[in-house]
Image (cartoon, rainbow, N blue to C red):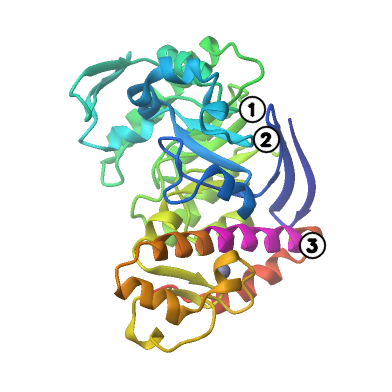
Amino acid sequence: MFKIISTSKNARLGILKTRHGEVETPFFMPVATKLAVKLISPNDLEKIGLKSIISNAFILYLDPGLNTIKKAKGVHKFMNYNNVIFTDSGGFQMASKAFLESIDEKGVHFRSPIDNSKHFITPEKNMEIQQQLKSDIAMVLDYMPKFEDKRECIEESVKITYEWAKRCKKSHKDKNQLLFGITQGGTFTDLRKKSSELICSLDFDGYAIGGLGMGEGPDLLDKAVKNSVKFMPKNKPRYLMGIGSVRDIVRAIGNGVDIFDSCYVTRHSRHHVVFTKKGEIRINKQKFRNDFTPLDKNCKCDTCKRYTKAYIYHLIKINELTWKRLVTWHNLYFVKNLIDEVKKSIKEDKFEKFKKEFLKNYKVK
Ligand SMILES: [Zn+2]
């Protein structure tokens, strides 16, 4: 199911096998909550070379609903994307006031923002939904605390997440669908250790590090990732949820993480942010009016092969929405290409040198 091909210090290059083929790790997946990556079609994803996306089981259960997905014969056929699809349980929605009613040990009471209907989601119910969606990788239902929560709340989330993980594992029957456990613990060293040990004792197909990317900052993130990975088995994939800034991705790969997802890349694209090897730039700045170079020097994406900064700046000024798609395409390609370079450096056992060089040049504002 997961095989490590090469390592360079703690960074790993591997292959994850799913029912929709193999995908090389490390990889980044864009968020397609409702089976749509904003402005990018499934066909585009294949052209960019993105072999995996993550959707959200709870949101799909609300809209378009399980009946439609079942009639379409699963999420892959529904969106005509024949690569790897992860489904998150919807635990993340607990952080949102728009959805959450209350949580007790049995499960989560949600409210649909679409029609205000109420839903009680238990770990068993969540597994049933994800199996019916026929995603390649299902995530357990976890109890995600907020970053500002006090220690007692984080402790409670570690406890409930473990109880729910046991129930998810017990009720999950589809042997062709992989099931990943999720660890919590906030930024507390001992709680990250405890959660990792508890969840890893349940023998899942992979392990996620949850509850981060919530405003803790790069140093606490780095520490929390190290304190989680340390207690995870070497022979299973590790997935850092919700992290998409390229600096954080490169650092986490150096800590032994294999999988990433975030809406950071696509969302920032729609707010004029362009990733370059020298850091992020804002393409709506006046200084690009007569800049006839591509978004990033040496980038081989379809946007950079054809268009200049000046042209994209012009599209923004005349409010021609195509610019959002062009920038999203470039940024997704940039992350994909960066990870390809990381993989090459791992193969050559030069990852640490690559990381040092990259982080030295990449300026984060
Ligand atoms: Zn480009």
Question: Mark 2 Cα within 10 Å, few/some/many (few <14, many 20+)?
Answer: many
User: CA–CA distance between discs 3 and 1?
Assistant: 27 Å
Q: Quadrant location of the N terminus?
A: top right
64 relative to 273, above or below? above
Query: Which residue does the numbered mark 1 point to in the structure image?
Result: 205
Q: Are marks 1 and 2 in contact (CB under 8 Å)?
A: yes
Q: Nearer the viewer, residue 280 or 295?
A: 295
State which region is magenta.
332-345
Q: Nearer the viewer, residue 65 or 231?
A: 65
Give x and y (percent) for residue 153: 28, 34
> In the image, what residue type sits under mark 3?
Asp
Give x and y (percent) for residue 304: 57, 72
- Ligand 1 quarter of the rendering: bottom right
Q: Is label 2 in a helix, a strand or a loop?
A: loop
Q: Residue at x 27, y 17 (%)?
A: 119
Q: Evaluate whether residue 180 shows in this view.
A: no
Query: Which residue does the numbered mark 3 point to in the structure image?
Result: 349
